[in-house]
Amino acid sequence: MAPVDRPLHVHIVEKNFAAVGQRAELPVLRNIDLSIERGSFVSITGPSGCGKSTLLNIIAGLDKDFTGAVDSGESELRLSYMFQTPRLLPWRTVEENIRLVLPDGESSDERVRELIERVGLSDAATAYPERLSVGMQRRAALARAFVVEPDLLLMDEPFVSLDDPTAEALRQLLIELWSRRPTTVLFVTHDRFEAVMLGTRLIRVDGRPATVVQNTPINLTVAQRRDRETVLAERRRVFQET
Amino acid sequence: MVFDTEGTKNGRMGRGIAGGVLTGRLGWTLGSFLALLVVWWVAAELLNSRVFPGPLTVAATIVSEAASGELGYHVGITLARVAVSFFIAMLVGSAIGIALGRARRADQFFDTWLIFFLNLPALVTIILCYVWFGLTEVAAILAVVLNKIPNVAVTVREGARSLSRDLEEMAQIYQFGWWKTLRHVTLPQLAPFFAAAARSGLALVWKIVLVVELLGRSNGVGHQLNIAFQMFDVSMILAYAIAFIVVVQIIETGVLQPIEARVNQWRR
């Protein structure tokens, strides 16, 4: 596929949640206008419940009920989405889950095996997801997201509710996978440290209805991201913490 | 990279316990079966009536019917009718159930129809089919199928209503297409509902097939029962009933249960 440098363009005039029963229509997002460079890793933060997941769903094309437009910048976009929960098929093994997302006729056994190995699931490849720990299920979901070699990878708090060491290991794994094969990533999180450690750009949404309140580059090299103090210093700069 | 210590616990599920339970259960089944035979035998001896034969008389009838080939022929015919109507009813009923479970408008509209057909007595469907289409094989099968479809549809509809939106979105993101979605996402979720429909369905279908045969066919177990009824040959009636129970039980344990176990192997 020839590299295309047109950015991903997201323009949301307004997005409301439909009225349910007694409750009136609820405005969620307003006046969001984003241009996202190819190959950038964008961390999106904001208070919980402010509409970050809705934003991702709109970009993913799962939610079409809004006014505005999303232009992927490519005629045929390969998309991956890592949801808050792993969303693996419980009746298929780890390996089958990863293989299944490949388009028909593109059965790259080698790539599947290599990714399973890289996320450390070689011993569990033939296991059913529900027999694995949540951490391992998320690693399987991560492998699944990367196996299709996406042009755009959406991640919705994929490491939430994991214990610290597990989440940290998964972050390192994500950095490694991403630096091997850079792709555009939109990473939603409410964890400021995580946002700075992973992202090349920070977008903060806030308000009710929510809109973009900050859009800043994060200046860290891959090596610097492994150092906690450097990340903390950058976090203070980006978030203007005192 | 190892940070989960519970990694490879899959596979070693408690096999030893399962084995013990199995022999224990088999013992109980065998014991209760023998007790039933003894009760039957004692009652028959006490009553000493031509219309209540004991187990030995019935066993003799089974042997002689089997030897003449009659038993095999009629049981075979009935089984064939059961199989054909069962598969047609499962297929059509499942399709209707999935459609109604997915489309709320259609569900609201056809719900009344379903309730009507659910409560329509089997005998009425059978009589009407014979009246409208004559005493033919097609009418017989159709009557059974029409009786069974609403049950399957209602059970599968329940499953289709509870399909996971999460997995559907996942399939949409990774561009599964309709066939891949059906095969890997939708049908596995419906499997328990198919199993429930198949189980209750088989029990229902073979009973209705007997009635259909009794009313309008010249072969099959139902037809044999009719003849035995006219001659007050209770031994014959019991012989065919027992033969059929055995066949149905073999299908249940030999075919349905293994399929169910295979389909459920991913569960923890």
Image (spheres, rainbow, N blue to C red):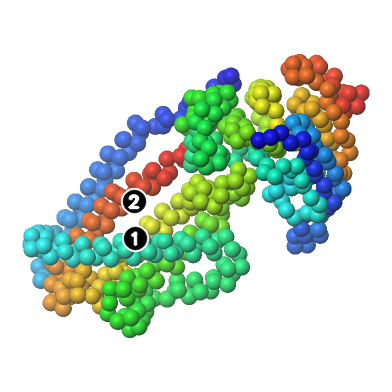
Q: Residue A241, position in %: x, y? A: 89, 25
Picture layout, residue A202 above or below residue B69: above
- The residue that disc 2 covers is B256
Q: Which chain does the numbered disc 2 sit on?
A: B
Separation of residues labelled 1 and 2 (CA atoms): 10 Å
Q: Residue at x 60, y 46 (%)?
A: B175
Of residue B43 and residue A132, the one placed in the foreground of this image is A132
Confirm whether residue B230 shows in the render: yes
Q: Which chain does the numbered disc 1 sit on?
A: B
Task: Kindly indicate the quadrant of the structure image that contains residue A240.
Answer: top right
Label whose residue precedes the other's in the sequence (1 or 2)? 1
- The residue that disc 1 covers is B202
Q: Residue at x 74, y 43 (%)?
A: A72
Q: Quadrant of the N terminus of chain B?
A: top right
Picture layout, residue B13 above or below residue B208: above
Q: In the rendered structure, which amino acid carries the disc numbered 2?
A: Leu
* Badge 1 vs badge 2, beta-carbon distance below 8 Å: yes
> Which residue is at the far front?
A2
Please indicate whether residue B212 sits to the left or right of residue B180 in the image.
Answer: left
Q: How many marks?
A: 2
Q: Residue at x 92, y 23 (%)?
A: A242
Crowding at mark 2 (Cα within 10 Å: few <14, some 14-19, many 20+) = some
Q: Secondary structure at mark 1?
A: helix
Same chain? Circles 1 and 2: yes
Q: Secondary structure at mark 2?
A: helix
